[in-house]
Amino acid sequence: MWDFISPVSLIRYLIVWRVNSIFVQLPRYLPTELSRVLGTLIAQRLPTEQAREWRKKVETWDAATASQGKPENKKAKEQMIPALPHDDGAWPIEAVLFAYPGKRALGQGEVILWELKLLGNSADHGMFLEVILPAMEEAGSTSDPRWQRPFNLWGRFDIQAVYAARGARWEPVASGGQLNLDYRATPAQWAKGLTFASERQFQQLTWITPFDLDKMPDTPGKPSHTSRKHIRSSEVPTLQSILDALMERMTLFLPGKHRVAKDAWALLNPDDQTALFVALQQEGARLQRHSLELPPRDWPGRWIGAQIFSIIPATLLPYLELASILHIGRQTHVGCGTFMLE
């Protein structure tokens, strides 16, 4: 397992924002707006040459918003959320924005928790400090009329703390308004101390965010949300398809331009490959039932819900844990494709 994860470059930041206004109402799906607002502010702050890629992405967002047409009334306007671009390229860097589940209506002093994950060549602590963190600070105090809607988040929060993951622990990068300039998060520390093993038995896989694994076996094309409301049996993820999606995700960390999933499978030695194949054939690996359904209308992804297995084979657990950390499938930039085991 350790040879398999050694190529993974990842820095995980836990962001804690504290509301400093009497009342704030979060967007229906926070990462979507996090991406757009922070991406816009980053583009404005960078020098012209560096900002070019960021501006292109912002223009993609604006075009997607315009394509939705003008809302018929004020309420409809406030409910609009920019459509996510077809690919994962909402930022020109490899990043995941994952908001912890919680309530949308917040009062003064309440906190918002979310994770920023920088992956691959974008796992750069210096870039976080110099580019992303200043944009967050500006977002908390902005008076830009583009973001000034009633009870909107922007301009109404302080950065209470920022932590970086070292294994299962969170180490302070900033707290109480003070930045620790001596702290240097590295792309390897996320795995320090993680055992990727558990003595517990798990039966349920619950998708915390919507998923879109896209290429499923025997699935003829990708239907839109408007074409049907129930998932086809062939599109319900199996443990095999989740592993396949993990291997596809792992190509992000491999050298070269033309990386494919089989190159990620090749990171496993023959014994590990055999063990995985045997585990997938076990009765416990078979899906018993599911409650997958469409996510709320303004959310990205295709399906959300839970899947029940007899007993998920222990051999698969380390790989499932890794998949949940990295997010799998499409639209991972806005947090899609992560789950918990129960």
Image (cartoon, rainbow, N blue to C red):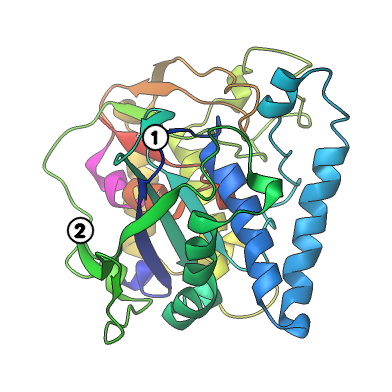
Residue for point 31% across, 83% down: 184
Q: Main secondary structure of the magenta part?
A: helix
Q: What is the magenta range?
A: 313-319
- Residue 6, compared with residue 233, is above or below; it is below
Q: Name the residue at 71% across, 83% down.
A: 47
Q: Please, what secondary structure does the residue beneath circle 2 have?
A: loop
Rendered location of residue 113, percent (x, y): 35, 46
Label 2 Cα crowd, 10 Å radius (few <14 / some 14-19 / many 20+): few
- Asked if the magenta segment contains residue 266, the reply would be no
**Residue type at mark 1?**
Ile
> What distance separates the C-alpha of mark 1 from that of mark 2?
34 Å
In the structure shown, which secondary structural element does the residue marked by tag 1 occupy?
Answer: loop
Relative to 275, say whether 151 is above or below: above
The residue carrying mark 1 is: 22
Q: Is tag 1's residue or tag 2's residue first in the polypeptide sequence? A: 1
The reply, left or right, for residue 317 in relation to residue 85 is left
Q: Which residue is mark 2?
A: 168
- Relative to 3, is 147 on the left or the right? right
At which x and y percent is residue 271?
A: 32, 61
Q: Residues within 10 Å of mark 1 (few under 14, many from 20)?
A: few
Are the residues tagged 1 and 2 within 8 Å (C-beta)? no
Mark drawn on residue 37: none
Q: Which image quarter: residue 281?
A: top left
Pick whichever, 20 or 12, lies toward us: 20
Q: Residue at x 30, y 39 (%)?
A: 110
**Closer to viewer: mark 1 or mark 2:** 1
Q: Amino acid at mark 2?
A: Ala
x and y percentages locating residue 332 in the rendered image:
56, 49
Residue 8 at least partly seen: no
Residue 175: x, y in percent?
25, 66
